[in-house]
Every structure is written in C-alpha cells, then in structure tokens.
Amino acid sequence: MAVSKQSVYEPLTESAAIALAVRLRLFPEGAPLVCREIGDGNLNLVFHIVNQQTGKGIIIKQALPYAKVVGESWPLTLKRAAIESNALRTFASYVPEYVPKVYYSDESLAITVMEDLSHLQIARKGLIEGKTYPLLSQHIGEYVAKTLFYTSDFGMNQQEKKQLAQSFVNPELCKITEDLVFTDPFFDHETNNFEDELREDVKELWNNDELHLEVAKLKRKFLTEGDALIHGDLHTGSIFASDEETKVIDPEFAFYGPFGFDLGQFFANLLLNALSRPEQEQEPLFAHVEKTWEVFANVFSDLWEQHNVEPYAKTPRLLQDVLHSTFVDAIGFAGCEVIRRTIGLAHVADLDGIEDKEERIRAKRHALRLGRSLILQRNSLNDIQEIRSLFLQAPLA
Ligand code: SR1
Ligand code: MG
C-alpha cells in the first residue's frame, strides 16, 4: 500500500486508530471493531484492533515524539517509525518466518500497521513465568545468522550495502544505546537507578580503570563498525514466542552495526532471566545461550560457504576469524547489557520483579559481577559453554 505524504502527525487515540484502520480498508466494511492501547514498552503507543465477529486483528504501532519511559522532557525523533517499518521489510526478505508482516506504514504519522501476534507471548513475560520456549534459540540463532550475513559485505553487493547502510543511519536511537548501555552505568550519571544496598558494588564499577578501558573498546566498536544491518535492541521484550513460533519485533534501533551486538543483547537477557530463577531452573537459559551461538555459527558458516560474494571468502581462517571476533564482542556486549539493565535507566522485570528485597539485591549483585566478568574475561573464553562457569563463579568474583 502506498505511503501517504499528506498526513499531519498527531498521537492516535483508540477511536482514531479504529478510524484509520477503517479508512485503510483493513477490515470488511461495517465490521464491529474494538481497540485497546497495549503498549508497555519504553517508547511507543501500540493499538490492538480486533474484529469482534471473526476474532481477527491488527496492530498499529505509533512512535511518540518523546521517550515515554521518561516523558516529554526527552524528545525523540519520529523517523524511528520509518526505520522500524523499513527494517521489518528488509528482514522479512531474508527471514519472513521470524518477523511480523507489515501491512502499511506512514512516515508522517510515524505508524506501522502490522500482523497481530497476540496468539504469542512476549518472551520476557513467558520466561519470567517459567516457560522455556524449546525452539527459541534455534529460531533466534537462524534469524541473527541470516539477517547479519545477507546484509553484510559477505552476503550482498558491496555497493548496494553502502546504500542500504545510508538509509538506516539512525543517530538518535544509537545515541540512546551509546549513553544508556555503554556510558552512563559506568559513571555516576543522573540516569542511573539502583537500590542503595548496591552502592558499594556500583562504585567499584565506576572506579575500575580496567573495566572502563574494555567498555570503551566495546563502545568504539558500536560507534564505528558497520558490519551488517542489526536489530539494535534484541532483548527478550522484542521477541514474541510460543513453543512453536518466534517473531522478532521492534527494530526501531536498527542500523549498520557490529556483528556481535544482537547476539550479545540476546545472551544478556537470557542470563538476566537465569539470575531471577532458582538454581535448579536455570539450565534451559544456559542451554539457549549455547544453542543460539551454535546455530548462529553453523548457519552463518553455511551461508558463507554457499553465497559469499567477497573474493577473499575462501581465504583460510577468514571465516574463523570473523566468527571468533563476533563471539568475543558478543560476550562483551552482553556484559554491558547485563550491567545497564541492573543499574541504568531501563531495567528488566526479570530482576525488578523479584519480590523479596534481599533476594533481589543478591540477584542484582550477582548480575553486576557477571557483567564485569563477561566484559573483562571475554578474550579468554574458549567456547560458549564457559559462560556457565562465569555465571556460577560470578558471586565469588
Ligand atoms: C529511553 S529508551 C530505553 C530503552 O528502551 C529500549 O527498548 C532500549 O533498550 C532502550 O535502551
Ligand atoms: Mg523496543
């Protein structure tokens, strides 16, 4: 459907969202429609419109001109809605089974109209309830491998890649990650938010020069390495799942970034969930971290062998070198994500939802030590299974 250029931005209400769906003829004429705003993320409005006769629905997602999590004092570009719909369409060309269908988008209204995934559940919520999603790592490993490979200099025409990268320049959303993931948590910054009981542990991070050096190196990679079109915010709240299906949503942070970033964020959020569980229930999370990496490495390697457009593709050890640096970076990025979700501006319900305060503080202290170990020891890990040992040793680190 064509993108309208005349619309003037205004935040939708539930009735305006229904009127828009009717105007776009997304439902049969006269269908009894109901709408609810269901957005529970940090940034956007999300309208769920359902035809009461058939039960069929759609989602209208609209960007607000500010960050909802903070309020109107934090203005935020509406262009992120176009980045999101374009990223969904681009990813759909490689992994249609793992992204929602986009029916319509309007850059001026900052909306994306897409497939209703309400038969699935946000993976973070399900994991908190103790679900394990047996296919999650198989699906995410494949999703990441294909989206990274096919949008990189190895998988697509290298001139076209530069053009694609240009259309995903996303400075404002990248700045959020640069600040909230890589900078603020490592300094005494006003955006940080943590319990008083953690102050001594947090101060240790603020005063640790070795840690600062390693986070600075990771931040530099995020700032400068344009390997592939990455999702940019691949935490478990950006994934809808069931035991059979997985859909990755919300790529408004998409841009050309480092290969390891999406994997790192996903690993971190699995580990954050493990931190919130009793020891005997952590196994499925470790297994997901390991399987995601194994599937990623296998699928990426197959694509490399079969579809590589780079003349140096067959050079001995090049693939191993790319996989190794992706692995090391992913572990480091995971460490930054674990720390920022514990003491930074945007927390996760996995940890904040631990009701018993003592237990919560213990889990958060564990998280800080795990994050630090992931960052500092990333270069000496030999394989993905060693994340388990880091996790188990972290309380003593
Ligand atoms: C102000 S936005 C806070 C966080 O929410 C998004 O999902 C990103 O993770 C961002 O860092
Ligand atoms: Mg999001």
Image (cartoon, rainbow, N blue to C red):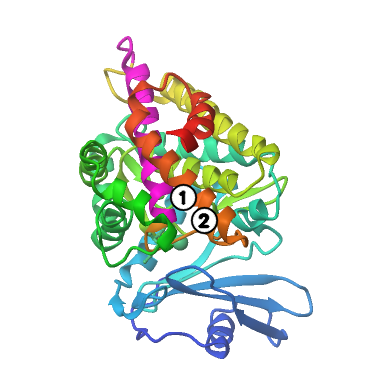
Q: Secondary structure at mark 1?
A: loop
Q: Which residue is mark 2?
A: 238
Q: Is residue 296 above or below residue 108?
A: above
The image's mark for residue 75 is none
Position in image of residue 2 (x %, y %) = 43, 70
Residue 275 left/right relative to 372: right
Residue 2 left/right relative to 78: right
Circle 1 packing at 10 Å, graded few (<14), some (14-19), many (20+), is many
Residue at (34%, 77%) from the top-left corner? 66
Quick one: 290 or 141, which is closer to the camera?
290
The amino acid sitting under disc 2 is Ser
Circle 2 packing at 10 Å, graded few (<14), some (14-19), many (20+), is some
Circles 2 and 1, Cβ within 8 Å, touching? The answer is yes
Quick one: 18 or 296, which is closer to the camera?
296
| 339 falls in the magenta region | yes
Position in image of residue 199 (x %, y %) = 36, 56
Position in image of residue 75 (x %, y %) = 28, 76
Quick one: 57 or 119, which is closer to the camera?
119
Q: Which residue is mark 1?
A: 234
Q: Which residues are magenta?
A: 314-342
Q: State the CA–CA distance, disc 2 to disc 1.
A: 6 Å
The amino acid sitting under disc 1 is Leu
Residue 315 in view, yes or no: yes
Q: Magenta segment, principal secondary structure?
A: helix
Disc 2 beta carbon < 8 A from ligand 2? yes
